[in-house]
């Protein structure tokens, strides 16, 4: 039920801090250590390469998950869009482990890959919000997102839950391999949950941004570097699917290789600046697009912020910024769709779970 909320999407955006706290509880033992299915831990340790398979928003969570698993657990990861995987199946490693990320657990494109790799005898882990779903039943192992039912077609709380569970999985794998880490995912996720909550209280400011930048525009670009690029892809998907504004995410460094030709007078460009090592370069991209007439909207993280930034998110661990930086994008997309009289929860031509290939 929506309760007092006008839309499920808004309710689900607001639920995110609570979902992250629930995940912390569910994946924590009585000594505050990670609690995870020992079979999953063994599988992560025993395989030499992880292949993440997903679609849409879940694919975007997978891109961030690759960073977690590679940086923290030192296991190589490839991320593939399910529908493309079979046509261009990569040369697999000796002991591949497949991870299917799917909110619904019913996505046909992902299932087709699961059936194929099971036939070849490979092991699969499904990360899903619906433990009894097809992808969960047909895989060897399941990790549950604990996000509660997600009703709006635009995925929000499942995305942040997916990244939280992937962070926990990455650290658990690192520990299983005996790697020493400074990073405690459970406490850092707690900090991220508080930051998310602070943002859901800043709706008016984000509604203003949507009004200023997006009420009449035909298109909008999202730029970022490193992990911010992946969040830009997700921001663009959110905006396009519910507001029908043509939105694309670009890597900051790619602008000069072609995409900057799209910038016209007044084109809104959303830029994310949450990573210290690329802050200087992304700021350079913002200047480049502004010099060509764009209307840049910079969302930065506290500590890296500048006077002219449109919005500043609280400081969180640099690996976990996507959980927080996506929230302004979700809310900006929501308000943009609302201002354009779109059906926020049920956008045209889309279904909540895509059960055909
Ligand atoms: O249920 P799944 O996570 O497998 O769904 C994958 C995509 O269909 C889904 O994320 C879709 O892109 C959303 N509408 C995005 O908001």
Image: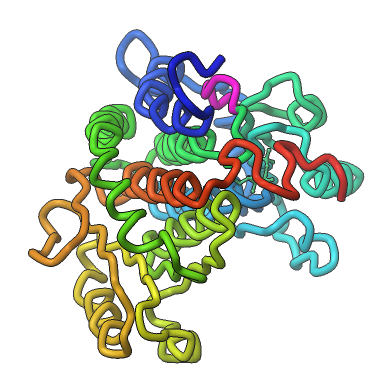
**First to last magenta residue range:** 144-150
Q: Nearest the camera: 241 or 348?
A: 348
Judge from the rendering whether residue 194 lies leftward or rightward of residue 231; answer left or right.
Answer: left
Where's residue 233, x and y in %? 50, 61
Q: Percent position (x, y) of residue 287? A: 23, 83
Q: Is residue 163 magenta?
A: no
Identify which residue is drawn at 26% across, 89% down.
291
Quadrant where the N terminus sits is top right
Q: Describe residue 19's horizontal placement relative to residue 319 as left or right.
A: right
Q: Quadrant of residue 286?
A: bottom left
Residue 188 image-quadrant placement: top left
Q: Is residue 222 left or right of residue 300?
A: right
Spot occupied by residue 345 in the image (x, y as percentages of width and height): 59, 36
Q: How many marks?
A: 0
Whether residue 177 is visible here, answered yes or no, is no
Rendered position, 27 above or below 232:
above
Identify which residue is drawn at 77% across, 63% down.
84
Q: Quadrant of ligand 1?
A: top right
Above or below — where is 336 with respect to 307? Answer: above
Q: Is residue 191 depicted above or below 68 in this figure? A: above
């Amino acid at each position: 039920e929506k309760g007092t909320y006008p839309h499920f999407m808004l309710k689900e955006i607001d639920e995110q801090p609570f979902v992250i706290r629930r995940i912390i509880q569910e994946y924590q033992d009585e000594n505050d250590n990670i609690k995870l299915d020992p079979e999953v831990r063994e599988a992560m340790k025993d395989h030499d390469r992880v292949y993440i398979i997903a679609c849409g928003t879940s694919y975007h969570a997978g891109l961030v998950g690759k960073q977690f698993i590679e940086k923290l657990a030192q296991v190589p990861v490839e991320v593939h869009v399910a529908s493309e995987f079979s046509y261009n199946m990569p040369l697999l490693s000796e002991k591949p482990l497949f991870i299917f990320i799917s909110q619904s657990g019913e996505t046909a494109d992902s299932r087709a890959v699961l059936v194929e790799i099971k036939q070849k005898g490979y092991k699969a882990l499904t990360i899903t919000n619906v433990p009894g779903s097809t992808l969960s039943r047909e895989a060897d192992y399941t990790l549950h997102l604990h996000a509660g039912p997600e009703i709006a077609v635009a995925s929000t709380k499942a995305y942040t839950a997916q990244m939280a569970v992937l962070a926990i999985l990455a650290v658990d794998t690192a520990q299983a391999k005996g790697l020493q880490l400074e990073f405690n995912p459970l406490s850092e996720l707690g900090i991220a949950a508080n930051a998310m909550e602070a943002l859901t209280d800043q709706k008016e400011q984000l509604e203003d941004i949507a009004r200023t930048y997006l009420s009449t525009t035909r298109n909008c670009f999202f730029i970022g570097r490193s992990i911010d690029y992946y969040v830009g892809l997700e921001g663009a998907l959110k905006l396009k699917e519910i507001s029908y504004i043509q939105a694309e995410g670009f890597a900051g460094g790619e602008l000069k290789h072609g995409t900057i030709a799209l910038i016209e007078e007044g084109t809104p460009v959303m830029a994310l600046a949450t990573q210290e090592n690329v802050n200087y370069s992304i700021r350079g991209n913002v200047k480049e697009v502004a010099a060509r007439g764009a209307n840049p909207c910079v969302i930065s993280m506290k500590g890296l912020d500048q006077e002219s930034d449109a919005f500043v998110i609280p400081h969180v661990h640099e690996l976990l910024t996507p959980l927080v930086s996506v929230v302004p994008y979700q809310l900006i997309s929501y308000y943009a769709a609302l201002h354009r009289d779109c059906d926020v929860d049920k956008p045209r031509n889309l279904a909540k779970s895509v059960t055909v290939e």
